[in-house]
Amino acid sequence: MRDIEAPVVRLQHVGKVFDANGQAFQALDEVSFDIARGEMVAIMGPSGSGKSTLMNIIGLLDVPTSGSYLLDGEDVSELDRTRQAQVRNARIGFVFQNFNLLPRMTALANVALPLVYGRVSAREREERARAALAAVGLDTKAASLPNQLSGGQKQRVAIARALVTEPSLLLADEPTGALDTRTGSEILELFRRLNEDRGVTLVVITHDAEVGRQMDRVIGLRDGRLVPQILETYYGVVAGARVAA
Amino acid sequence: MLREQLAMAIDSLRANTFRSLLTMLGIIIGTGTLVAVLSLGNAVQGQVFEQFIDLGTRRIAVTAGDPSARGARDVPGYGLLSLDDAAVVRDLVERRPDLFRTTTVEVIVPLDIRAGGVGLRDSVVGTGPEYARIQSIRVAHGRFLTSSDETRRAPVAVLGGLIARDLYGADPAAQAAALGTTVQINGQAVEVVGILRAAGGPFSADRRVLVPVSTLRLRLNSELDVPGRGLRVNSILVGLVSEQLTDDAAAQIRTALRAVRGVPPEAIDDFEMSLPTEALGVLRGINGAITGFVALVAGISLLVGGIGIMNIMLVAVTERTREIGVRKALGATDRDILGQFVLEATAVSLIGGAIGVSGAIGLVLLVGTLSGIAAPIAWGAVIIALVFAAFVGIGFGSYPARRAALLLPVEALRYE
């Protein structure tokens, strides 16, 4: 099922049409690209460019109207809701702008939550959640509640939660958007380390040019279509800072 | 998975303890009412039935006719019973041992009773030795009245259990010591020869002082005659051989009494007879009506409780839309979410049921202790109450839970 040789993500002619007050609205049009295993990719574009829709499709929170989506070589564009949930659980780790930790659960319980839905035993859940917390440097905060943590720490817990099922893909939606610049770069540093040490594949949705610059590659989107050279054209910066650095 | 969901449910109830309790209120009241009323109802019913079976099912009581009844004749002293009537019944009883066992009368007068500085006003009952048998009375100390007491007009009295308690205290030794001492009844000294065991219940002799009829008439109070017919009696009690013979026995008594009292053939009886079968039927009917009413009240309460749960769960689903979105993003299936919310609603309902049932059990035990009536918990009602509570939770939790389960993750995540 999970084809290691295949690209993690392969979108082919993906289109998404919304019905807005009786009028069809083309949110995505003929979008095709691959994301290779171990790659760090930013999806960038201005508001309304369709990048949230694209993220939802990649994250299996939504299905394309046309075209196909292969995750780990498996066609996932027409799964039912239950299978979608199972694939999200096993292969995709979400990191949100606003962390989205459940407030009444400890950091450890938050990290372990995806394993609950993956029907992992309580004992193994605890072990794996602790390991994931250690990987983001928060092993001492296991018993803390989210409101006892700083913004950066919350995002680290969220990253641990995304990593705990060892997904094929880490999907981060504006992961530094709610953080100050310094904490933001610490989070980016953590992503880079996870990518280098563990080969984690990362897709970041952002409109922050600085975040885009630090990725291996930027996929630009405008009015639902792919645009090449988006950083240079629209943000006036040079891509590939990471490679250059 | 169930364990995790249960933990989540408990956790979310604890996060809103007060709200959860308010939500449970209908369920608490519903289940509590059911268990408390059925338990106490059973106890009271048991008590009453026991009394009836003890003293009532093989007995006919003849009491005075109602002068205001339709068809009552306008004659002086209409309806009153006297010793003459009792004598006729006694003749009948002696003639027909196949139907009757024994008979006696009750002459009831409220009088002042004093002993050792304690004063009471209670019923002094003139009766005979047969009273003990007909009423299934048990003597705790001393003896019951005898026929020799009657012929000698002996100034003796047998005290009901509660009278003895009031006069001498609850200590059995103190009560036993009172035998042979005197009490003042209407200012006259009367010797205590017996004390009855307290039987409890509304039909017992617990609050009575029993004396021979002749003593009551000649020594204690002499103004009780029905003009021209001898001493007025409140009731004539007749013990039957078997309750199967009730109808036949009643017909015989009726004929004899109508004859001696000169009731014209077309006139209605100028006395009343209470038959055990009627009373039992009435009691059963009342009990059935009470049970039905309680079931209705409890049912409405549970229904209202269920609507309360549905309401609060709908609020919870809205409040936690984002949480639901996050859970779905992390891999919760629709069924996981459905299960979580149904379980939460069921937990609310069951905890409410447990609180209601516990409260009711406490109440029943308390009432049992205070009243001295043995009140067994109606465990059947407990089980029914809890099962109902669970169904209410599942039933009324399903709709909100479905709404939660069918939320689209994309929209739920976007919800502020």
Image: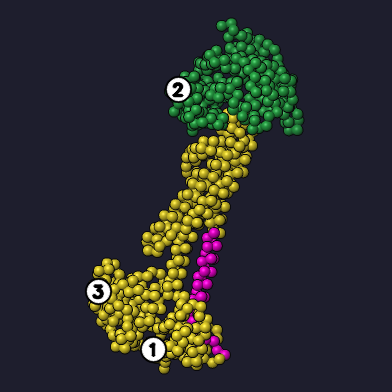
Amino acid at pointer 1: Leu
Q: Are marks 1 and 2 in contact (CB under 8 Å)?
A: no
* Residue A208 appears anywhere in the view: no
Residues flagged by tags 3 and 2 on a common chain: no
Magenta-span inclusion, residue B404: no
Q: Helix or strand or loop: what does disc 2 sit on?
A: helix
- Tell me the magenta residue range: B266-295
Front label number (1 vs 3): 3
Residue where numbered disc 1 is placed: B231
Report in which chain the residue with disc 3 lies: B
Q: Helix or strand or loop: what does disc 3 sit on?
A: loop
Q: Is residue B220 above or below residue A221?
A: below
Q: Position of residue B81 (x, y in %)?
A: 44, 86
Report in which chain the residue with disc 2 lies: A
* Residue B253 appears anywhere in the view: yes
Amino acid at pointer 2: Asp
Marks 1 and 3, the one that precedes in the sequence: 3
Residue where numbered disc 3 is placed: B178
Q: Colour of chain A?
A: green
Q: Is residue A226 above or below residue B143?
A: above
Of residue B284 and residue B355, the one placed in the foreground of this image is B284
Q: Which chain is yellow?
A: B
Q: Position of residue A71 (x, y in %)?
A: 66, 22
Quadrant (top left/top right/bottom left/bottom right) for the N terminus of chain B: top right
